[in-house]
Amino acid sequence: MSGAAAMAAGLAGVLALGGAGALASRNAEVIRRWRTWMVSAPLVAGFLWFGAPGAALLAAGLGAVGAVEYGRLARLKVADSWLVAAAAVALPLVAWRAPSLAGRVLAAALLAVALVPVLGGDAADGGRRAAAGAFGIAWLAALTGLVLLRGAALPLIFAVSVADVGAWCAGRLGGGPALSPLSPAKRWTGAAGGALAGVAALAAAGALAGRGVFTPAHAIAVAVGAPLGDLLESMVKRGAGVKDAGHWLPGFGGLLDRIDSLLVALAVAVIL
């Protein structure tokens, strides 16, 4: 069995076990989340099965939806939101077709989103708009990691998802001090449990998918990047005064609530 096929079979087995656990828990929220995973996991795996083209299209689609949600959270004007969305869609496609130009495209997008309020003469709110727009572009640019990481992308997604579940379970069972004022419900025990579960899942995925998956860089991305990504989105939501980035994804809220951990994990993996 090829590495990709073994990874797909392993993912199906985990989803089945997760479903049994979710139904046994009789927790409505957990069951809703499992149902969302049952739809999203095969969809994501299907895109990544086609290699760089599929990864680029997946990242562009996630970027477009994420940009819409972020625009609402950051209270961006229409022009700013359009620029963030355009950059989020363009960057994965550039990373696929012309990776050497990705840095220039990112720099141009950051400059453009900063100049829009300047050209509009927005003296009252221009600085905030420019900063928020640049942050949104940089945040969602991490999705290019789905293209750049190639065969390691799906195992990393799997490991981050397991880390999220492990953090939720360990935090509820272990209690203890809060991880950060940004998210008082999250505990240090949850961060530790999530890191252990995520790294173990990455090791298992590496055994199935082959070499180049279970590396120190990817382990750091899962253990450290995933919880930081969760806190980063919590900071953005607290600034916006909302609990969730959206209300359309059952069990999660919005897309950013689902991929917040993954965004920083991807960035860390690519940088390292």
Image (spheres, rainbow, N blue to C red):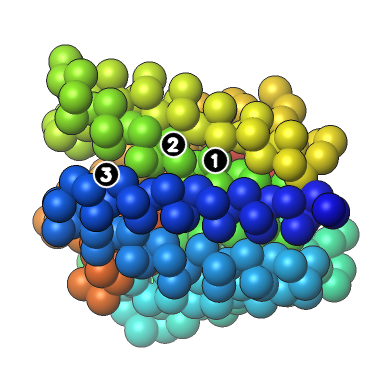
Q: Position of residue 101 (x, y in %)?
A: 82, 64
Sequence-wise, which precedes: disc 2 or disc 3? Answer: 2
Relative to residue 5, is residue 260 drawn left or right? Answer: left
Q: Neighbour class for label 3 at 10 Å: few (<14), some, many (≥20)?
A: some
User: Is 37 located above or below residue 62 in the figure?
Assistant: above
Q: Nearer the viewer, mark 2 or mark 3?
A: 2
Left or right, residue 111 beside residue 7: left
Q: Residue at x 38, y 76 (%)?
A: 68
Q: Residue at x 28, y 19 (%)?
A: 189
Cβ–Cβ under 8 Å for marks 2 and 1? yes
Distance between the Cα atoms at labels 3 and 1? Answer: 23 Å
Q: Which mark is residue 216?
A: none
Residue 224 point in image, percent of width and height: 49, 27
Is residue 234 among what the camera can see?
Answer: yes
Where residue 212 sits, quadrant-wise, is top right
Residue matched to label 1: 159
Q: Residues within 10 Å of mark 1 (few under 14, many from 20)?
A: many
Name the residue beneath numbered marker 3.
235
Q: Which quadrant would the C terminus be assigned to in this image?
A: top right
Callout 2 secondary element = helix
Residue under label 2: 163
Q: Position of residue 44 (x, y in %)?
A: 58, 67
